[in-house]
Amino acid sequence: MEATKDNVTGLILAVSSSVFIGSSFIIKKMGLRRAATTGKRAATGGHSYLLEPFWWIGMISMIVGEIANFAAYAFAPAILVTPLGALSIIFSAVLAHFILKERLHIFGVLGCALCVVGSTTIVLHAPHERIIHSVKEVWELATEPGFILYTCAMIIVVNFLIFYCVPRYGQTHMIVYIGICSFTGSITVMSVKAVGIALKLTFEGTNQFKYFQTWFFTLIVLGCCLLQINYLNKALDTFNTAVVSPVYYVMFTTFTIFASMIMFKDWASQNASQIATEMCGFVTILSGTFLLHKTKDMGEKPVLPPPVFITPEHTRNDSEAI
């Protein structure tokens, strides 16, 4: 399918976002390592990293990446932008291999290759961005019966998870925290897209902030982001990051694409072959992501404590002491 100008702009912003975000992890880790040699480590409650320029450069890189990702949703459909978030994993893994000397083994290379192939497949078959002239049009899409039903279902499920499942299963079942983040995240992205479109049209000369709908979507973004951050931190603090990250990526991306399909009808102008190709690309990215995370520590030899030999004399002396 021929790429439109908006799709190309959204693609460039999404890839740029992945480069900045992927690089930010490496730069911040360099700052953390330097800080650990001169003060208390962050993992043990230290804050000496705040004095390290590398950490701040990494933080600025992450902020720039998130702004680029935010802007990408104003130009391209979510089915194109969201899966490309996996590219940040590739940049992070490759830079870690060369800069931090964290070995990228053959399965890691294969995972990176799968992400690239999947991303390319989606880019080549992504639907055109819907042409929208006012945030009121986004509001009309958001208030159609299909999306209202989806939103109500998400609200019910999220409240059930928060008030019933979290107290009982939150500490033992990772899916509870991840589910809250993913379900809420799909609504967040739709609102982010609405705010991004409003900003885009405003910069083009048509002020969209005179409409209450723009401010409503902004409040939804802020509220949902705070909820996601809270429960994602709980998940990361309770469970293994190597498992949390890929599962969250899969669930978040899946529900975001589903929500976009309902609200913006991304697949309305595509045939079954194009949709199937996009899904194959998405599954390929998921496979690469899981492979990268699940095998990232393969080949690293664990540091074992030195062996302790117990002689008969030590055993006899211990028995006499008792």
Image (tube, rainbow, N blue to C red):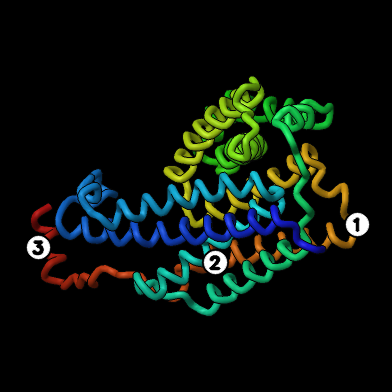
Type of the residue with mark 1: Asn
Kindly identify the residue that appears in the image at 38 percent across and 62 percent down: 26
244 or 213, nearer to the observer: 213
Q: Are marks 2 and 3 in contact (CB under 8 Å)?
A: no
List the residue tagged with mark 1: 271
- Tag 1 and tag 2, C-beta contact below 8 Å: no
Question: Can I make out residue 78 in this image?
Answer: yes
**Comes first in the chain, label 2 or label 3:** 2
In this rendering, position of residue 116 left or right of residue 101: right
Marked residue nearer the N-terminal end (3 or 1) = 1
| Of residues 216 and 223, the one drawn nearer to the viewer in this rendering | 216
Question: What residue is shown at x 72% (from left), y 47% (from top)?
Answer: 257
Comparing 118 with 215, the one in front is 215
Local packing at callout 3 (Cα closer than 10 Å; few below 14, some 14-19, many 20+) is few
SS of the residue under disc 1:
loop
Q: Which mark is residue 176?
A: none
Which residue is denoted by mark 2 in the rendering?
A: 292
184 or 203, which lies in front?
203
